[in-house]
Amino acid sequence: MAQLLLQISILITWLGLVLNIGTGLYYMVMGDLVTGLIALWVGTPYLYAPAVVFS
């Protein structure tokens, strides 16, 4: 059971990482440069670290 829950949490972490990068790029393309950069510079490392550690 623990292995299944760990795999689900890894999937959710990678999904959050992909959505965060997509959101940051979307905001940058739409002209809100500051929000896009904050999403990429702050959110991406915060979500990437658990994805790498638990993979």
Image (spheres, grey):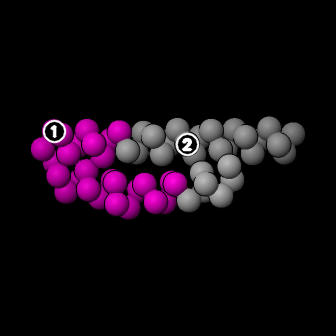
Tell me the tag on residue 22.
Answer: none
* Disc 1 packing (10 Å; few <14; some 14–19; many ≥20): few
Q: Does residue 41 sit above or below 31 in this rendering?
A: below
Q: Residue 41: give x, y in percent of width and height.
A: 34, 60
At mark 1, the secondary structure is loop
Total numbered labels: 2
Q: Position of residue 19 (x, y in %)?
A: 42, 39
Closer-to-camera residue (32/51)? 51
Residue shown at 27% from the left, 42% from the top: 25
- Quadrant in the picture for residue 14: top right
Q: Where is residue 18 in the image (x, y as percent from the top left)?
A: 45, 40
Q: Mark 1 points at which residue?
A: 30
Q: Residue at x 41, y 56 (%)?
A: 43
Q: What stretch is highlighted in magenta?
A: 22-48
**Mark 1–mark 2 distance (CA, rounded to whole Å):** 24 Å
* Main SS category, magenta section: helix
Let me know if residue 20 is in the magenta part. no
Say which residue label 2 marks: 14
